[in-house]
């Protein structure tokens, strides 16, 4: 099985953030499988079957969506050195060697999500 190395940030929205750098995982995993692995399955989600076949993550490591605060997933665009809010569900994010993702627990601001690191640059897409 081909293995790849990926990086993930989990930012809890209260100043606490944890990096998982150079995590070696199978190349056929998606971002949801990676999240389960990193959190030792401490993830709660709602699964939407066909035609979507994807999970909506509602809790990571005991921190649950509440009122207008929820989890969002971001992709680091290496070339632009900026974060892009994922336009697809976590199950649809394929993993590639060197990929950097971030989960951010933040206020839901439709149309204006904030990047996972304070002061970081964001772009519409990679």
Image (tube, rainbow, N blue to C red):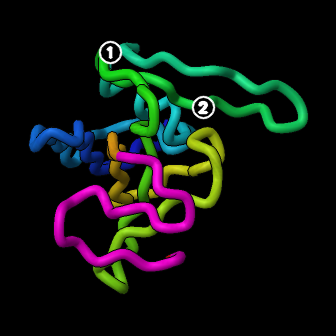
- Above or below, comparing residue 61 to residue 33 in the picture: above
| Residue 42 drawn at (x, y percent) | 36, 14
Residue highlighted by disc 1:
40
Is 3 placed left or right of 121 in the picture? right
Q: Residue furthest bottom?
A: 80
Tell me which secondary structure the magenta stretch mostly adopts: loop
Residue nearer the viewer, 37 or 125: 125
- Is residue 52 inside the magenta stretch? no
Residue count near mark 1 (Cα–Cα under 10 Å), binned few <14, some 14–19, many ≥20: few
Front disc: 1 or 2: 2
Residue count near mark 2 (Cα–Cα under 10 Å), binned few <14, some 14–19, many ≥20: some
Quarter of the image holding residue 61?
Answer: top left
Range of the magenta residues? 107-125
| Residue 30 drawn at (x, y percent) | 55, 40
Circle 2 sits in a helix, a strand or a loop, which is it?
A: strand
Q: Measuring 41% from the left and 31% from the top, which residue is drawn there?
A: 35
Residue highlighted by disc 2:
56
Is 110 placed left or right of 99 in the picture? right
| Residue 105 drawn at (x, y percent) | 33, 40
Q: Measuring 28% from the left and 50% from the top, which residue is drawn there?
A: 7
Q: Measuring 45% from the left and 68% from the top, which residue is drawn there?
A: 84
Q: Measuring 32% from the left and 15% from the top, which residue is drawn there?
A: 40
Residue nearer the viewer, 97 or 8: 8
Quarter of the image holding residue 64?
Answer: top left
| Residue 122 drawn at (x, y percent) | 36, 75
Q: Residue furthest right?
A: 51
């Amino acid at each position: 099985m081909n293995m790849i190395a990926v990086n993930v940030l989990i930012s809890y929205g209260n100043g606490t953030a944890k990096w998982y750098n150079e995590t070696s995982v199978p190349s056929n995993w998606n971002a949801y499988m990676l999240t389960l692995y990193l959190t030792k399955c401490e993830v709660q989600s709602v699964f939407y079957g066909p035609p979507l076949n994807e999970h909506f993550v509602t809790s990571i490591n005991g921190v649950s969506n509440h009122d207008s605060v929820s989890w969002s997933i971001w992709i680091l665009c290496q070339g632009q050195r900026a974060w892009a809010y994922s336009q697809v569900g976590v199950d649809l994010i394929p993993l590639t060697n060197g990929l950097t993702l971030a989960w951010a627990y933040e206020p839901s601001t439709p149309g204006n999500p904030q990047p996972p690191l304070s002061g970081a640059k964001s772009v519409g897409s990679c």
